[in-house]
Image (spheres, rainbow, N blue to C red):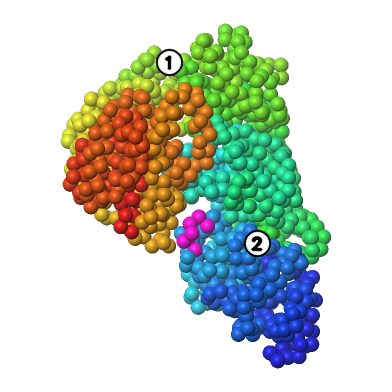
Amino acid sequence: MSLRLDADPARSSALLDQFESNWKPQLPGISLLTELEVDKETVAEVSRALGQLYRRKVLKGQHQSLFDRWPGCVAVAMSGVAAHDYREGTFWRYWWEAIYYQELAGQQDAKAWGQAFLNALRTFRLPLFSERSMRYVGPILMHAGIPTFCLERFFNLLLQRRSADPGLDADTLLAWAVGRENRLRGLHEPAQWFIRYGTDHAVDVIDRCFDLLDRLRAGDHDFDGLGLPARYLDQAQALFADDRLDPGHRTTTDMRPRRTERPRLAIDPFGQGVRIILPPVGDTPDGTARWSVTVDGVQSMVKSRSMWLGTAEAAPSTSYAIARPARVAQVSLYGAAHESEIGIVDSGDPLLIFKENGDRLSDHLAVPPDSVWLLHPDDREPVADVPLRTVVTGSLPIGWDGWRLVQVALEGATWIGLSGEQTRRRPVRGHSKPRVITGEPLTGVTTPYGSPVFSEPPAIWLPAETTTTWLVDVRPAAGGDSVFSDSFTVNEPTEVSDALWSEVSRPILGAFEITVRGPIGRSTRRTVFIAEGLTARFTPQVRLFTHGGLVAGQAAIEAVPGMAAEPALPTYSPAEQKHVVTCSAGHRSEPLIVAPPSMKVLTEERDQNPQWGFGPVRLVTESFDEIESLQIEVPGLSTLPPMELLVGGRSVQELAPAGRGRYSLKRAQDTIAQHRSAELVLPLAGRAIPIGSVRPNQLATGVSDQGDHLRLEGCVWVEGLTAGIYLCTAPWREAKIVTVKEDGSIPLPPDLVGAGPMHVRLSVESPWFFSEWPRWPHPREVIKCETAGQYGGADDEERLLSGYLAGANRLPEHVSRLDRLWTIVDLANRIDYPSAARRIEDCASLLRRHPESIRFLPDAALPPDRAIVALVTTGLAAAGVDNYLETDDRLWRRSPLVAALLTGPVLTGLAEDSDLLAEIEAECGESAAAILRGEGDPHPEAGQFDRFAELMDRRSPEELEQVWSNAQLVPASLLDRDTRVAAARQLFDERHRRDGRMLSAKAADMLREAMAIRVTEYRGLEQYIEARCHPQRRDGWVSLSAMSIACALIARVAARGHEGCQHLEREFRPLWRALSKIAPELTALDLIRAELLIAGRVA
């Protein structure tokens, strides 16, 4: 039926009646209106009919009857116009053209049509997207998906990101896209809107488009199973044919990237707490994966090692516990170009939501109406539009004091957030999604990648609130053709099982990716490993601790005919926790990890990364007070008895558990201080199970060089005794970790023979996980081995640097690896104290000749509190760097202090949409943006020691701790007021100690000289010094925080060539260095702030 503009109203009504009856039963079965396949001509015809009738009914004041009679037509036409006709500008322009109402349209018409669209969504129970701004246009654009005109840029963005990161998936891309405001600026506004606010729908559309583009790259034009609107497919093929997409090399082979696991945030509610899961890594030459994990600027190395190199084919998954609330983490494999950024706590919305399995639910996704874990500050309660039912309360490590972890059920809720004004409401939304039904996994059996193993092929459950079509695809996870692909239209919940596997040879062995797609936003994708018919039995059923580790055990692995398991009866010594069993079926062979159920223990120390161990722990008397608790877990037991401390075989104290097996060792400190040694045991099954021991840390009295090995003197050898060898002539080298032999000898690697003085740190290592060895140990932790020689080096430059440290030659004039000089500056006092001052000045002199050497400081991996000291010590905190590089922008994520100095030359007059400004604002907050706009610092007094600080000075340490414990539970941006106040607290705590007293005595003179900045061309900056000063005095400890910003401003003015400030900086440098040592956080923040203030004053 075709309709002219002047058609009879009755004909228009008949046309709308026809389409309304056609669409009405289909609309409840979709998620977005764009899924209803309506071509452009039909949309235009329906729009004209609606426009003709609207014009007539408006004149009679009866337009609401039009909306009530044809809600489906209203919704489909409006979203269809947005999808097909949009080019640039606002939506209403195109709608008035579609209904031929341009000359008459006003604000009241937009309101009427917008409200009609929302009412239609309610009628058909479609998503309202009401949590976003743009009350009417927002939902219309969301239901249009990506308009056809916008698809070219959208597809190219996906291809560009996939080219840079071949394993990129939809969720990771969406997290990247919403991580910075300007990352989507190359897209048209409707596409930006859909990606930013589309939640699950955006993830699903991106995922399907990735599949579409991957198939085009592979020359595969079979688009069955994608479930995308036809206009997406047509546009992609047309763009591809016209070479307007860049899909890479065209080939007929399967180029679809294999999906890879990525580092992710998760919660262990009764153990590690908040942690980063580091995925398995294949293709590691020595079977060891080395991860760099940087949390709020503090870098750590995390290792994972395959115990079966060449068999398991991968270093297994491991985890890194987040010791305290933090804002962001950067994770990468050493030597890899790609870096994952993981947001942790958002200061604007400090609610972390985790799925029932512990995985973090991305902030840009809607919350499912299920049970979820909520992590939040204790002073803000979770709120929703219905009462929340608490399922269970979790436990958190000591560094998360002031936070609460609770599992709640969200039945009936439509949003959830935190109490307080302007709280963000996370939508709780979701029709039932398809489920992959697996049954219970095999106990104690996983893949080398840590995935569960199932002995029965899974089924698929398809929901059907209304008649719905589901597209199902099953294919090997390693790649290849589908083993099943079909569609199912169901009007009642349906389970599909046998049909999925009818074409697969039996018994089934291997990993399969199962994808179920239906209405957009309701897809399911899951990878399942199947070893059909496999069973595992264990003797004993649970391995408990013994003095040597775990009690010996055995597994019995039984396979069905057609499958073999080798070995079928693996045995486990006390030191073995798992074995590889190879399963074979036909031409397929897969390694599996078999680990019998066993008890485990976790030692919790403040600011440490705790790991689960599978044997008694060895605790050191001298550091016992640093240990917070032991967490013990025994499979099958939800409650555990009190733990006993035995001295001389006699029980001297009992420790009752809190929650699920968490034993506070703080209550045992007095007992250990009195007795020095003790045994920790747990009465279980009528036995005293050894949990650990406490012993003094006298493992050796000295060490000597014996040529090809070191010899420990007075060695007390224990199982697991390990030496970390730190080379004084090459301190930039990672410590060599060597097992100590029973005779107390330490075999030296060939490159350490004759390599000069060494520091040896001894530790008793657990066989169950890698310990994190310090970059360089504290002097009280080491035994020094004084011996002649120098490190041979990997090249001439390293050999000469090592020779310099050994006293064999002068410092080379030319050094390319400047990060090694930064390491010498940092560690000189620990390596050789008598020579430290000379070596620091030698290196500093060379570094100052090359101010761009600041760029190498992050490569030295100095902790942030030592990096600021190194910058001040060398004088490079007052250096000007002229050779800005675009790659310096990314340093704002890893090392904001270094980034501020390197990007300083281009900070003045930054465009509002620049990538650099986005990086700065993401790290430093709105205060930094305000400063760079020339508006000044909104919090110049933050960190001031005023009359309130003087009142605090009179309080006891216990009272102070009570006050501070309630401060800044939520980590904020670097220049946030609360961040500065917390940094000043560090300085406040040092006010009466040696360096604090020395600085206090010189404060008045120093501030008086610093105020000379007011007679320079930088006049006006002195106001920031005055804002930190006490209202009535400028002497004593109350002026310490003012000294910090004064030194920073003087240094950054000096960097711009002002001779007077250069003289003052050199004069103040010893004081500034002492200040940076006792208050590194405030010193670093003030240096960043000074650079921004100078750049912003001429904005």
Q: Secondary structure at mark 2?
A: loop
Q: Position of residue 409 (x, y in %)?
A: 72, 44
* Horizontal relation, residue 19 to residue 164: left or right: right
Image quadrant where one finds the C terminus:
bottom left
Quarter of the image with the N terminus is bottom right
In the displayed structure image, the side of residue 412 where residue 349 appears, left or right: left
Q: Residue furthest front?
A: 1032
What residue is pinned by disc 1?
Answer: 698
- Mark before the other along the chain sequence, 2 or 1: 2
Residue shown at the point (57%, 62%) measured from the top left? 195
Circle 2 Cα neighbour tier, 10 Å, few/some/many (<14 / 14–19 / ≥20): many
Magenta range is: 178-184
Residue 987 vertical position relative to residue 1027 in the rendered view, above or below = above
Looking at the image, which residue is at 70% across and 53% down?
Answer: 414
Residue in the foreground of this view, choosing between 773 and 378: 378
Q: Position of residue 883 (x, y in %)?
A: 27, 55
Residue at x 49% of width, y 59% of height = 181
Residue 953 visible somewhere in the drawing: yes
- In which quarter of the view is residue 297 placed? top left
Q: Is residue 157 above or below residue 831?
A: below
* Position of residue 696 measured from the top left corner of the image (x, y, whole percent): 46, 15
Q: Looking at this view, is 882 or 551 the one in front?
A: 882
Can you identify the residue that label 2 sits on?
129
Q: Quadrant of residue 866?
A: top left
